Amino acid sequence: MEKVILKIKGISCAACAAQIEKALFGLNGVKNTSVNFIAQKAGVIYDPSVLKLSDIKKAIEKAGYKIDTDEDNVKKAANTGNLKTKLLIAACFSLPLLYLAMAPMISLPLPYFLSPSSAPLINALLQLTLTIPVIIAGFNFYTSGFKNLSRLKPNMDSLIAIGTSSAVIFSIYNLFMLIQGNSEAAHSLYFETAAVIITLILLGKTIEAAQYKRTGDAITKLMSLAPKTAIIIIEGKERIVPIEKVVSGNIIFVKPGMKIPVDGVIIQGISTVDESMLTGESMPVDKKTGSSVYGGTVNYNGAFYFKALKTGSKTVLSQIIRLVENAQNSKAPIARLADIVCAFFVPAVCAVAVLSGIAWFAAVSFEFALSIFISVLVIACPCALGIAAPIAVMTAAGKGAKNGVLFKNGQALEIAGKIQTIVFDKTGTITEGKPIVTDIILGNSAWGAGNWKDSAEIKENFLQLAASAEKGSEHPLGQAIVNEAEKLGITTIKADVFASMPGYGIKAEVNGIPVLAGNKKLLEKYNIPLGKLEIVSDRIATEGKTPVYVVIHGKIAGIIAIADTLKKNSKKAVERIYKMGIDIVMITGDNRKTADAIAKEAGIKRVVSEVFPQDKLTIIKNLQAGIRKVAMIGDGINDAPALAQADIGIAIGNGADAAVEAADIVLMRNDPLDVLTAVNLSKSSIRIIKQNLALAFGYNILGIPIAAGVLHLFGGPLLNPMFAAAAMSLSSISVLLNTLRLKQVKL
C-alpha cells in the first residue's frame, strides 16, 4: 500500500469532502481515504498494483474538483486576501441597502425622493443597484452552488445560492409589478435579505479563514525553520549553494547564529545548538566532534564543519513536517459520525425547505412561504458539523508538535486518551539507555594460580578480551564494555570470529582465545557453573545492576557489572500515570533481580523480566485479550512488532528508525513525562470534539425547525432570513472558538 496526499481546489464545505470521499471509495484498490476540507487536502491509501495515481486524480476531477498545483497555491494565497476585500465591498453596499429597506419600518428618517411610500420605484431601483455589487462579491457561492446542484450533488454553496437567488428573483418580479403601476409590490422586496445574507456568510468565511490559518501555523512555522542556503566546502573553498543542491557527503560550514541546513555529524569544531524545534527544550545542547546535528536547528556561539548525512525529505525536520501534516489531514474515528450526517445533510435540508415552503404557501401566502424557504436554506450549516472534528485534530496535532509529541494520525490522537495499560520497555525508556560499567569482578578459575585480586595486569587483560569480543556487538551493554576499555586507554583487538546470539549474548574468538559474554541463560546454555561468583552475581542484581558473565576457555572468568540509571523524570512519570488510573507493566530481557530493582526504584508494580524480543508481542496480545486498551513504549528495533501490535505504539524519538516507523506517537524529547502530555492532549481534544459536535448538532436540531416555522404554529416568533444567516455563521464560529481552547490546555 502507498499513501498520497493531494491538494484539492474547490472544496467549500463538509458536503464537498463527503462527495470526494464517496468518489474515491468507489475505486477498486483504495483501502482508505480522508478528505479534510479545512486543509483542502485528500489523503488516500491505495494499492499501486491495482490503481494508478492518475486514476485517483481523474476520479476527483470527475466529481467536480481540481488538483491544486503550485501556481494554484499562489492564487489561493491571493484569494485569501481577496476574501477580506469581498467582505468590505459587500458590507459597504449592504449597510445602506439595509437602511434604505428597513428605515420606514422602524421610523428612521429617509429622504422624500427615496421613500418607498412616496417614490417606490426609485427606492426599488436603488435597492437593486446596491444589491448587484454584493451579488458579484459573493459570486463564488453561485458558480459553486449551481454547478454542484446540476450534478445532483448540492453543497453548502447550493443552499446559499438557491436561497438568495429566490429572494432576488422574487424581488425583481415585484420590481416589474411596480413599473406596471402596482404600488403594493413595494412591500414585497427582498433585496436587502439576499445582500445581508451574503455579507454575513462572507463575514463568517473570513473569520473561519483566519482561524484556519492559525490552526495551520504549526506546519507553516516548521517549514520556515529550514534555511534556504548552505555553505559547502569545495576544494577547500566556501561556496553558498541553495539547500536543494546539498547532497549526502558534502562538508558544510556553519557560522555562529546560522541555521543548520541538513542532518549530519560534526567533524571539526565545538558549539552549542538550539534544538527546541525538535524537542521543545529551551536549553541549548553542547556539540563537539562526533555529535549529530539536525537541519533547522540554530547554531549559537561556535563555528564547526559537519558532514551531511540526510538531506531533503530524509531530514528529521522533513519527517516531523510530514508526520504533523499526516496527522492534521487524518480523521479521528469519532469524526465518522459527522461525515455520515454531512453526506445526507444538504439534500435533506433542501427537501425540508421545499416541503415547508409548500405547506406555508398553502396555509398563508407565497411571500410568507418564500421567507420560510429562504430561512431554512440559509440557517442549515453542514460546515459546523464538518469542522467540529478536523479543526480540533489539526489544533491538537500542532500543539503536540510544539510540545515534542508527534501524533501520526487522528486515530492515535483519539485512542491515546482511552489507554488503560501502558507497557514500558526498560532500556532507553524508563532508563537512560546508556549503561556504564560500575564493577569488574574476576574469578580465578580461568586465570590459573596467583593472587588475582592484586593483579592489575590480569584485570586489564580480562577487560581487553571482553571489550574485543563485544566490539562487534550493537547491544548497549556490549557498547558499555567497549566504552569502559576506551576510557581506560585499553586497546581492543579485532576478533577472529564473532557471532551474536539474541537473547543470550555473543560468541567470539580473540587471538585464538574463545570468549563468551552474556546473561545467565548463556551460562545455562553451555552448562557453565558460576561457582563462588554466584553470591557476587546475586548482590549485583539486587543493586539494580546488570551482570554480564564473561567466559574464557569455557570457564567463568569474571563478571562485569553494568548499570543503566533511571531517566530524570521516570519516577515522576510513573507516579502521575498511576494517579490517572492507568496500569503500568515494565518488560525487559534483563534478569528478574535487576528488573525488580529498577522497577522498585521507578515505583512500577508489575514487571515481566527475562523476555526474548518475540515475547514482547505475546505479552501485548495477552494484555489486549482482557479487552484493555494497551499502549507500548519502546525505542529498539526489537520493539517494533510490539509497537505495531499495541492499540497505541509510542516510540522514543532517538530510538531505532524501525521503532519510530511502527509507532503511532513519537516522543521527540525522549522524556517519559511526555507520555502524560500525549494522554492529556488526547483527552482534551476528544472532549473538545464532543463539545463541537454537540454545538453543531444542537444548533441544527433547534435551528431548522425554528426556521421552518414550527414555533410560529404555536404563536412563537418567525425567524427572519437575515437572522438565520447570522446564526449560520455564528454556529461555525462558535465551534472554532471552542476549539481554540485547546491551545490553552495545560499538558
Image (cartoon, helix red, strand yellow):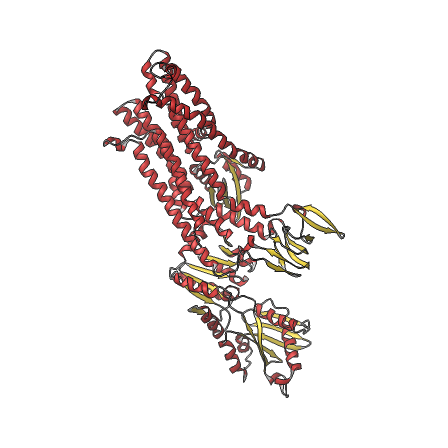
**Drawn side of residue 480 relative to residue 357, left or right:** right
Q: Which residue extends farthest top?
A: 181
Task: Give the percent coordinates (x, y) of residue 638.
Answer: 53, 63
Q: Is residue 47 visible?
A: no
Taking the spot 51% from the left edge, 38% from the top edge, the residue there is 8
**Drawn side of residue 736 relative to residue 486, left or right:** left
**Drawn side of residue 628 relative to residue 705, left or right:** right
Camera-side residue of 266 and 148: 266
Task: Give the percent coordinates (x, y) of residue 695.
Answer: 36, 42
Quadrant in which residue 125 is drawn: top left
Instruction: Reply above or below: 347 against 444.
Output: above
Q: Is residue 678 visible?
A: yes
Instruction: Reply above or below: 506 against 333.
Output: below
Q: Which residue extends farthest front?
A: 109
Camera-side residue of 712 and 497: 712
Task: Give the percent coordinates (x, y) of residue 559.
Answer: 57, 78
Task: Give the percent coordinates (x, y) of residue 669.
Answer: 53, 58
